Image: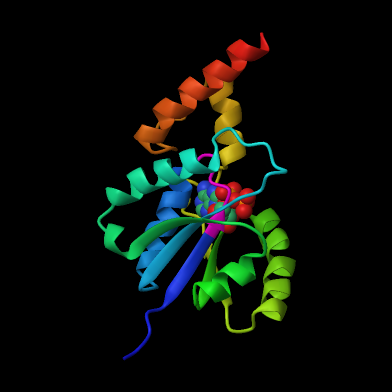
Amino acid sequence: MVSPRIAIFPGSFDPLTNGHVDLIRRSTHLFDRVVVAVLVNPEKRSLFSVDERLTQIREVCQLLPESAQIEVDAFEGLLMHYALKREACAVVRGLRSGVDFEYERPMATMNAHLAPTVETVCLLADARYAHVSSRLIKEVASLGGSIDGLVPTSICERLLARVRAETATRS
Ligand code: ADP
């Protein structure tokens, strides 16, 4: 039997945006299984906890036509150790600009050194979302700007509630 081709899509997803969702969907067309892997990084301050992000991502992915191919998980430590443990053949990353490319290139080279059997596959961001980052989404939301169409609706509501709560605590 041929083993399934598994890809890992790693990230912070704080929060998941429609740019991420687009990449997840497109990855399922290239691989048998896509594992959306939330990086556990206790040193990085996040808006949503890892458990909250796992729940949010699972809810969104369950509604996708490709849901049967998608798994949502968390990992800690070296991505390549996780990719090898999951017997993945690829890691998927998104490229929004040359800045992303410059960041990804040394990472991909180092990851190839650590795990030569795991390919880094970079997908170009869809033009609709090339300006979208989790950081910018949080900034715009906290200043009262519209993030409609850029973040899944279920996450949008929770994001607005959380940034409002954070603003209230600070003032
Ligand atoms: P990280 O902290 O690893 O940058 P992110 O959650 O910000 O994690 O992003 C995870 C991956 O998704 C990265 O490869 C990033 O380039 C990609 N990505 C983020 N936003 C978009 C977008 N709008 N379109 C396409 N890819 C994206």
**Spot occupied by residue 19 in the image (x, y as percentages of width and height):** 47, 48
- One can see residue 98 in this view: yes
The magenta stretch is: 10-15
Q: Is residue 94 above or below residue 52?
A: below
Q: Residue at x 55, y 58 (%)?
A: 10
Q: What is the chief secondary structure element of the magenta stretch?
A: loop
User: On the rendered structure, is 126 left or right of 63?
Assistant: right
Quarter of the image with the C terminus in it: top right
Q: Looking at this rendering, what residue extends furthest in the top direction? A: 171
Q: How many marks?
A: 0
Question: Residue 157 magenta-drawn?
Answer: no
Say how the picture is coloured.
Answer: rainbow
Q: Looking at this rendering, what residue extends furthest in the bottom direction? A: 1
**Spot occupied by residue 11 in the image (x, y as percentages of width and height):** 57, 53
User: On the rendered structure, is 65 left or right of 165?
Assistant: left
Question: Residue 12 magenta-drawn?
Answer: yes
Residue 1 or residue 141, whichever sits in front: 1
- One can see residue 132 in this view: no
Q: Is residue 65 above or below residue 83?
A: above
Q: Residue at x 67, y 57 (%)?
A: 98
Q: Is residue 102 above or below residue 40?
A: below
**Quadrant of residue 138 in the image?**
top right
Q: Residue at x 62, y 13 (%)?
A: 169
**Quadrant of residue 34 in the image?**
bottom left
Quarter of the image with the N terminus in it: bottom left
Residue 15 or residue 19, whichever sits in front: 15
**Spot occupied by residue 102 in the image (x, y as percentages of width and height):** 72, 61
Q: Residue at x 51, y 39 (%)?
A: 15
Residue 11 or residue 135, whichever sits in front: 11
**Spot occupied by residue 24 in the image (x, y as percentages of width and height):** 42, 58
